[in-house]
Image (spheres, rainbow, N blue to C red):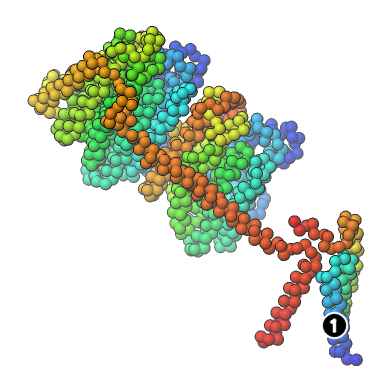
C-alpha cells in the first residue's frame, strides 16, 4: 500500500468527520450534541495534522496534536459545566433558548 | 486751584453723590438724599464757573491711559475750552435747578434715593460726554447717558397700570439710541482709520495741515456722526422714542429729554465742525433732515392732549431747528439756541411737572383749565416759557430763533419759508397748551379742583430762576442793532475759545434786513398770541375729543402714524424673521437635520443587526458559507483564471 | 506643579470624603485653587515662560502669561460656580465635586500644556466630567439631546485627533515651540486639511454657526452649575486653542485659506444668534443664543491675527465668562425659586425682590457692554478690527449692539417689570449677592483699566514665534 493512496484515504476520513461535525453543529440544537460536533471537528483537524506530519516526516505537528487534545479536554470540561449551569437557569439545553443577549 | 484739579473735582462731585446715595441711600432720610445730590451738582456748577472765569484757550487734562497700543493711544483725558465749559455750565446749572425741583416733585415717591442716584450718574455721564478730549471718552459718556436715560424713563416700572408701558418706552429709547450709537461707532472706526487718533485737537491739526482731505471719506465719517446725532437728538428717522420717553418722571424729561442729553447730537456736530466743514453734502443732509423734523414734529404737536407730549414734540421740533442752523454751518447760532432752549424748555417741563404734581398725576389738558388762579407762580413762569419759545419779542427764544431765521434767509429761501411755517405752528400749539391749561373753566371735576394746590418753594424757586433766565437769556447774543460794542458776545466767546470755530463765523445780516426780519417775526408771534386768546379764551373752545377730529387733526393726533409705520416696516419683519430663523431654520432645519443624521445611523444599525439573530446555528451557517465562498474563490482563481 | 495637580488631588479627596462634607470641601478646594494660582502669578514676570516637567514622556507643561490668565480665569470660574450654587442641592453631591475638580484639572491641563498631544488628551479629559455631570444632574428627557452634545463634541475631537496625528507625522515634532518653528506652508493643501480638523473641533465647541444646535438644548437641560461651567470656561478652550495653538502654528497658507470662511461663520452667528434670541421664551435659551452671538464675534476677530485684537479678545473672553456666570446664575435663581424659566410665566419680580432686580439689572447692563464695563472696551475694539478688515462685516458685527439691547432688555424687563405673576420670591442670599458683586467689580475694573490685562498677556500673544 503506497503512502499516496493512504494519504487520500486519511484525508477523506478527516474531511468526512469535519463535515459531519460542521453540519451537526449547524442543524442540531442540543447543546451536548453541539459540543460533541465541535469535538468531532477538532478531531478531524487533529487527524489531518497527524496525517501530514507522517507524510512529511516531521514530528512537530504531532506535538501540536497533543496540545490540541489537552486543550480540547479542558474545553470539554468548561463547556460541559457551562451547559450544566445553563440548564439550571432555564431547565433546557436547547441552544435557541439562549438568545437573551440579542437585545 | 489749578485747572486740572478743578476739573477732576468737578467730575467727581456727581460721582460721589451717586456713590453715597447709591450705597447708603436706603438708610438716609429723603431731605439728606436730595440735598446731597443737589449740592453735588451745584458744587460742580460753581467749579464750572470758576473754570469759565479763567478760561484761556484749550487746556487738555490727561487723567490716565486706558489702552496703549503702538499706533493708537486711548487716554481718559479731558478738554477745557469754551464749548465744553459752556455745555458744562448748562448741564450743571440747569441740572442743579432740576435736582432742587425734584426734591419736591419726587417727595412722595418710594424710589426717591434711586431717582437721585440715577440723576447724579446721568450728570456724571453727561459731563464725561461734553468734557472728553477725544471721541472715545465722548462715546463713553454717550453710551452712559443712554443707559441713564433708560433707567430713568422706566423709573416707574412699578406703576400698576402703566408699569410695563413705562419700561417698554425705556427700551424703545435705548434701542433707538443704540442704532445711533452704531453710527457713532462706525464713525469712530473711520476716524481712527483716517487719522489714527481720536483726539479732537489732533484731528483738527491734521486737517489743517492737510487741506486735501475731502470727498468720500469725510462724507461717510460725517454721515455716520450725523446718524449718531439723529439717534441721541431725536431727529427723523429716529425721533419717535422721545415722545414715548415722557413716561419718565417730569424732572427727567426736563433734564435729559429737553435741556441736556438730547442736545448731545448738536454738541457732537459742533465739536466735529472741522470734519463737517469738509463735507458739504452731509451739511445739506443735516439741513433737510432738520427742516423736515422741525416741520413734522411741530405738526404732530398741534393736536396732542397730553401736556408732556406737546412739550416733547416741541423739543423734537426745536432740535430740528438747531440742526437747520448746523446745516448752514452756523455752529454758534445752534449752540445759542441750545442754551436758550435749555432755559425755556426746562422751565416749561418743570412747569408742567408742577401742574401734574398739583393735579395729582393728571396729564390730560382736556381735564385742566383755569389753573392760573390755583397755581399763580406756576402759571406766571409757564407763561414766560411759552412766550419765550413762541418768539414773543425780546425774550430769549426770540433772539436765538431770529438768528437761525437770519441764516436761513441768507442761504436758502425755501428753508426760510419752511421755518416760518414751523415757527408759526410752534406758537400755535404752545399758546393752545397755555390757554387750555391755565385759562377757562376747570374741567377736571370739583373733587379734583379742591385738591389742586400750588407747589412748594423747592419747586417754585427753580421755576422762577429759569423764568428769569428765559427772559434775559437772549442778552448773551444780542444782534448788532442793539448794542454795537457788545453785540454777538456769545458768537465771539465760542468762536474764540473752541477749536475750529475760529475760522467759521455765522453770517450777520445787514441792519435793514435784520430789522425787517425781527418785525416780521414779532408780528407772526403776536398775531398767533391774539388769535389763540380769542379762540381759546374768548370763544372758550376746548380740545376736541378724538372722535370729533377732522382729517388733518386726526393725522396730527396720531403722530402721522410713524410708530405704526415703523412697526409695519421694521419691527414686525424682524420679529417674523426671528420667528422664522428660530423655529424653522434652527429647529426644523439644523437641529432636526442633526437628529435625522443620528436617526439614519441608528436605522441602518437596526437593519443590519437583524442578521445577528442570536441563533448559534445561523452564525455557524454563515461562517461555513463564508468559508465556502472563500475557498471557492481561491480554487477558481487558481484553476480557471490561470 | 501644585497648580496643575491640586485639582486632581481634590478630585480624589472628594470621592473619599463623606457626603456631608462635600459642599464645604468643594468651596474650600476651589478657594485654595484660586489662591494658589493668584499666589503663583504674583511671583511671575509677564515676560517669562515657566517650564514644568512632571516626568511624563509626551506631555510637558509650560506657563506663560496667557496660560496664567486662562488658569486664573478657570479657577475663578470654579470658585464662582461653587459660591453661587452653594445653596443648591448639586454642590452637596459627592459625584459632582469629584467630577468638577477633575474637569478643573483637565482645563488647567489644556491651558498649560506645551505639547500638542497633551493638548488633545486634556481636551478630551474635560469632556468626560461635563458629560457625566449633565447625565447625572441634568433634566434630559430624551437621551438623544444629551447624545447630541456628546457626539457633536466627539466628532469634533475625532477630527482634531486626526489632525494631531497628521501634524505629528508631518513634522515629527510635538512641542509647541518646535511646531512653531516647523514650516507648514511647504505642505500647502495638507496644512489646510490639518487646520480644518482643528477648526472643526473648535467650531463645535465655541460654537460657530451651524455647529451650534447642541448648545441651546444642552444649556437649558443642564443644571445651572453645569451650564455655567460649559459657557463660562469650557467654550473658552476653543478660543484659547485658536489663539495659542492653531493660528500661530498654521500661520500662512492654511490661515489665509480659513480666515474668511471662519469670519463669515462667526458673523452669521452674531446676527443669527441675536435674531433668534429676540423671540425666545426660555431665559436660558435666550442667554444661550446670546452666547452664540458674542462668541462668534470673538472668534471672527481672532481670525484677523492682529496683535491688538488678540489682546482685546482676552478681555472679551474674560468678560464673557463674567456675563455668562451672572446671567445663568440669574436664570438659575429664577428657576430654583419659581420652577420655571419661561418669561411669559414671569412678571413683577422686581417688586418683591428688589435686591435681585438690582443685581440682575447690573449684570444685564454688563452684557449690554455699557461704559465702565469690560464689554465696552472689548466690543469696541473687536468690532473695530473687523471693520478695518472689511467695512460691511464691521457694520454687520456692530448690529450686535442693537439686537443685544433688544433681547437682553426683553429678557430682563418681562420677568422683572411685567404684570405681576409671581408675588412670592425669596430675595438673594449672601452667597448669591457676593457672586454678583464680585462679577460686577471685576467687569468694572476691567472696563476702567483693561490695560492691566492686555499688557499682561501682550508678550505671550505678540511673540508666538520664538
Drawn side of residue C255 relative to residue B416, left or right: right
Residue C459 in percent (x, y) is at: 49, 45
Q: In this view, does C11 lie above or below B442?
A: below
Q: Where on the picture, by quarter, is residue B519?
A: top left
Query: In the rendered image, which quarter contains the C terminus of chain B?
Result: bottom right
Q: Is residue B159 above or below residue B579?
A: above
Q: Is residue A3 above or below residue A40?
A: below
Q: Is residue C455 visible?
A: no
Q: Residue at x 30, y 31 (%)?
A: B555
Nearer the observer, B368 or C402: B368
Q: Residue at x 74, y 78 (%)?
A: B631
Nearer the observer, B613 or B402: B613
Looking at the image, the residue that sits furthest to the front is B548
Q: Is residue B431 above or below residue B129?
A: above
Q: How many labels does the image show?
A: 1
Query: In the rendered image, which quarter contains the N terminus of chain B?
Result: top left
SS of the residue at dot 1? helix
Residue A64 in percent (x, y) is at: 86, 74
Q: Which residue is drawn at 48% across and 34% down?
A: C410
Residue B341 in percent (x, y) is at: 27, 23
For mark 1, does the 10 Å Cα neighbourhood hold few (<14), some (14 to 19), or many (20 or more) residues? Answer: some
Q: Where on the picture, by quarter, is residue B604?
A: bottom right
Residue B43 in percent (x, y) is at: 37, 17
The residue singled out by tag 1 in the image is A11
Q: Which residue is drawn at 26% across and 46% down?
A: B216
Q: Is residue B171 visible?
A: yes
Looking at the image, the residue that sits furthest to the bottom is A1
Amino acid at each position: 500500500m503506497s503512502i499516496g493512496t493512504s494519504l487520500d484515504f486519511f484525508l477523506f476520513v478527516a474531511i468526512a468527520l469535519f463535515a459531519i461535525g460542521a453540519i451537526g453543529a449547524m442543524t442540531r440544537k442540543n447543546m451536548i450534541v453541539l459540543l460533541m460536533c465541535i469535538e468531532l471537528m477538532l478531531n478531524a483537524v487533529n487527524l489531518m495534522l497527524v496525517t501530514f506530519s507522517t507524510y512529511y516526516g516531521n514530528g512537530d505537528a504531532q506535538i501540536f496534536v497533543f496540545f490540541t487534545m489537552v486543550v480540547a479536554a479542558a474545553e470539554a470540561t468548561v463547556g460541559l459545566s457551562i451547559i450544566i449551569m445553563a440548564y439550571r437557569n432555564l431547565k433546557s439545553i436547547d441552544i435557541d433558548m439562549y438568545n437573551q443577549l440579542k437585545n | 486751584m489749578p485747572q486740572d484739579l478743578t476739573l477732576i473735582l468737578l467730575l467727581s462731585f456727581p460721582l460721589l453723590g451717586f456713590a453715597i446715595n447709591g450705597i447708603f441711600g436706603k438708610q438716609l432720610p429723603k431731605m439728606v438724599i436730595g440735598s446731597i445730590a443737589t449740592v453735588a451738582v451745584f458744587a460742580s456748577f460753581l467749579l464750572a464757573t470758576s473754570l469759565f472765569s479763567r478760561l484761556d484757550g484749550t487746556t487738555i487734562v490727561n487723567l490716565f491711559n486706558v489702552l496703549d497700543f503702538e499706533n493708537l493711544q486711548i487716554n481718559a483725558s479731558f478738554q477745557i475750552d469754551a464749548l465744553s465749559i459752556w455745555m458744562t455750565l448748562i448741564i450743571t446749572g440747569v441740572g442743579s435747578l432740576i435736582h432742587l425741583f425734584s426734591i419736591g416733585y419726587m417727595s412722595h415717591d418710594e424710589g426717591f434715593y434711586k431717582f437721585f442716584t440715577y440723576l447724579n450718574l446721568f450728570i456724571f455721564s453727561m459731563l464725561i460726554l461734553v468734557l472728553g478730549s477725544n471721541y472715545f471718552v465722548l462715546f463713553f459718556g454717550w453710551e452712559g447717558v443712554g443707559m441713564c436715560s433708560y433707567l430713568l424713563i422706566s423709573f416707574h416700572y412699578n406703576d400698576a397700570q402703566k408699569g410695563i408701558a413705562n419700561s417698554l418706552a425705556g427700551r424703545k429709547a435705548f434701542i433707538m439710541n443704540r442704532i445711533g450709537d452704531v453710527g457713532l461707532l462706525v464713525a469712530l472706526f473711520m476716524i481712527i482709520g483716517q487719522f489714527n487718533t481720536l483726539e479732537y485737537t489732533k484731528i483738527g491739526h491734521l486737517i489743517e495741515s492737510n487741506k486735501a482731505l475731502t470727498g468720500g471719506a469725510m462724507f461717510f465719517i460725517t454721515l455716520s456722526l450725523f446718524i449718531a446725532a439723529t439717534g441721541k437728538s431725536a431727529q427723523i428717522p429716529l425721533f419717535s422714542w422721545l415722545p414715548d420717553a415722557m413716561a419718565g418722571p417730569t424732572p427727567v424729561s426736563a433734564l435729559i429729554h429737553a435741556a441736556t442729553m438730547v442736545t448731545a447730537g448738536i454738541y457732537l456736530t459742533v465739536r466735529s465742525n472741522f470734519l463737517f466743514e469738509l463735507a458739504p453734502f452731509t451739511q445739506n443732509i443735516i439741513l433737510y433732515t432738520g427742516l423736515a423734523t422741525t416741520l413734522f414734529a411741530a405738526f404732530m404737536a398741534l393736536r396732542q392732549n397730553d401736556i408732556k407730549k406737546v412739550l416733547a414734540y416741541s423739543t423734537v421740533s426745536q432740535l430740528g431747528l438747531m440742526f437747520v442752523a448746523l446745516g448752514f454751518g452756523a455752529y454758534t447760532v445752534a449752540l445759542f439756541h441750545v442754551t436758550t432752549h435749555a432755559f425755556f424748555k426746562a422751565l416749561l417741563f418743570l412747569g408742567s411737572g408742577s401742574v401734574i404734581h398739583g393735579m395729582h398725576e393728571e396729564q390730560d389738558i382736556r381735564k385742566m383749565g383755569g389753573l392760573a388762579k390755583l397755581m399763580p407762580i406756576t402759571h406766571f413762569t409757564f407763561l414766560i416759557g411759552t412766550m419765550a419759545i413762541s418768539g414773543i419779542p425780546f425774550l430769549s427764544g426770540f433772539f436765538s430763533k431770529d438768528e437761525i431765521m437770519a441764516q436761513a434767509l441768507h442761504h436758502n429761501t425755501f428753508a426760510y419759508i419752511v421755518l416760518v411755517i414751523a415757527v408759526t405752528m410752534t406758537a400755535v400749539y404752545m399758546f393752545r397748551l397755555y390757554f387750555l391749561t391755565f385759562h377757562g373753566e376747570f374741567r377736571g371735576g370739583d373733587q379734583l379742583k379742591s385738591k389742586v394746590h400750588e407747589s412748594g418753594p423747592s419747586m417754585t424757586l427753580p421755576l422762577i430762576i429759569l423764568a428769569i433766565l428765559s427772559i434775559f437769556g437772549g442778552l448773551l447774543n444780542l444782534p448788532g442793532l442793539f448794542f454795537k460794542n457788545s453785540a454777538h458776545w456769545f458768537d465771539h466767546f465760542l468762536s474764540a475759545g473752541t477749536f475750529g470755530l475760529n475760522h467759521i463765523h455765522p453770517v450777520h445780516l445787514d441792519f435793514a434786513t435784520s430789522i425787517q426780519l425781527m418785525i416780521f417775526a414779532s408780528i407772526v408771534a403776536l398775531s398767533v398770541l391774539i388769535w389763540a386768546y380769542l379762540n381759546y379764551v374768548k370763544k372758550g373752545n376746548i380740545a376736541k375729543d378724538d372722535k370729533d377730529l377732522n382729517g388733518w387733526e386726526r393725522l396730527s393726533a396720531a403722530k402721522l402714524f410713524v410708530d405704526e409705520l415703523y412697526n409695519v416696516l421694521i419691527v414686525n419683519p424682524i420679529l417674523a424673521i426671528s420667528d422664522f430663523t428660530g423655529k424653522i431654520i434652527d429647529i426644523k432645519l439644523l437641529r432636526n437635520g442633526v437628529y435625522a443624521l443620528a436617526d439614519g445611523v441608528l436605522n441602518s444599525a437596526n437593519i443590519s443587526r437583524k442578521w445577528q439573530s442570536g441563533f448559534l446555528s445561523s452564525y455557524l451557517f454563515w461562517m461555513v458559507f463564508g468559508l465556502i465562498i472563500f475557498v471557492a474563490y481561491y480554487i477558481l482563481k487558481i484553476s480557471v483564471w490561470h | 506643579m501644585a497648580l496643575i495637580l491640586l485639582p486632581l488631588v481634590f478630585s480624589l479627596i472628594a470621592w473619599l470624603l463623606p457626603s456631608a462634607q462635600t459642599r464645604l470641601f468643594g468651596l474650600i478646594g476651589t478657594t485654595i485653587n484660586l489662591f494658589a494660582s493668584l499666589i503663583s502669578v504674583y511671583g511671575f514676570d509677564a515676560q517669562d515662560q515657566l517650564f514644568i516637567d512632571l516626568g511624563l514622556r509626551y506631555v510637558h507643561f509650560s506657563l506663560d502669561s496667557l496660560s496664567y490668565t486662562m488658569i486664573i480665569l478657570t479657577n475663578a470660574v470654579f470658585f464662582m460656580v461653587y459660591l453661587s450654587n452653594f445653596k443648591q442641592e448639586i454642590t452637596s453631591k459627592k459625584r459632582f465635586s469629584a467630577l468638577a475638580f477633575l474637569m478643573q484639572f483637565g482645563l488647567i491641563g489644556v491651558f498649560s500644556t506645551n505639547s500638542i498631544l497633551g493638548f488633545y488628551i486634556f481636551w478630551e479629559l474635560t469632556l468626560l466630567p461635563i458629560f457625566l455631570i449633565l447625565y447625572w444632574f441634568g433634566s434630559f428627557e430624551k437621551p438623544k439631546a444629551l447624545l447630541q452634545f456628546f457626539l457633536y463634541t466627539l466628532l469634533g475631537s475625532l477630527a482634531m485627533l486626526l489632525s494631531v496625528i497628521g501634524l505629528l507625522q508631518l513634522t515629527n515634532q510635538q512641542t509647541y515651540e518646535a511646531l512653531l518653528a516647523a514650516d507648514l506652508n511647504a505642505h500647502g493643501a495638507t496644512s489646510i486639511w490639518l487646520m480644518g480638523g482643528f477648526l472643526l473641533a473648535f467650531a463645535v465647541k465655541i460654537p460657530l454657526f451651524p455647529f451650534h444646535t447642541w448648545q441651546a438644548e444642552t444649556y437649558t437641560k443642564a443644571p445651572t452649575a453645569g451650564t455655567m461651567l460649559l459657557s463660562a470656561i469650557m467654550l473658552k478652550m476653543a478660543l484659547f486653542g485658536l489663539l495659542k495653538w492653531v493660528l500661530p502654528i498654521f500661520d500662512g497658507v492654511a490661515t489665509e485659506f480659513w480666515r474668511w470662511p471662519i469670519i463669515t461663520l462667526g458673523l452669521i452667528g452674531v446676527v443669527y444668534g441675536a435674531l433668534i434670541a429676540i423671540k425666545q421664551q426660555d431665559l436660558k435659551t435666550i442667554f444661550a443664543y446670546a452666547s452664540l452671538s458674542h462668541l462668534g464675534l470673538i472668534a471672527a476677530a481672532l481670525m484677523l491675527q492682529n496683535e491688538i485684537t488678540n489682546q482685546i479678545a482676552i478681555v472679551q473672553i474674560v468678560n464673557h465668562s463674567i456675563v455668562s456666570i451672572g446671567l445663568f446664575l440669574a436664570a438659575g435663581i429664577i428657576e430654583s425659586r419659581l420652577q420655571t424659566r419661561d418669561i411669559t410665566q414671569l412678571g413683577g419680580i422686581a417688586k418683591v425682590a428688589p435686591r435681585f432686580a438690582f443685581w440682575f439689572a447690573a449684570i444685564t447692563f454688563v452684557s449690554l457692554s455699557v461704559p465702565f464695563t469690560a464689554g465696552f472696551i472689548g466690543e469696541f475694539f473687536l468690532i473695530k478690527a473687523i471693520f478695518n478688515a472689511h467695512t460691511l462685516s464691521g457694520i454687520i458685527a456692530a448690529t450686535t449692539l442693537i439686537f443685544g439691547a433688544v433681547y437682553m432688555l426683553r429678557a430682563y424687563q418681562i420677568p422683572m417689570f411685567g404684570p405681576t405673576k409671581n408675588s412670592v420670591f425669596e430675595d438673594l442670599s449672601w452667597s448669591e449677592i457676593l457672586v454678583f458683586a464680585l462679577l460686577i467689580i471685576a467687569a468694572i475694573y476691567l472696563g476702567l483699566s483693561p490695560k492691566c490685562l492686555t499688557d499682561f498677556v501682550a508678550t505671550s500673544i505678540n511673540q508666538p514665534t520664538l
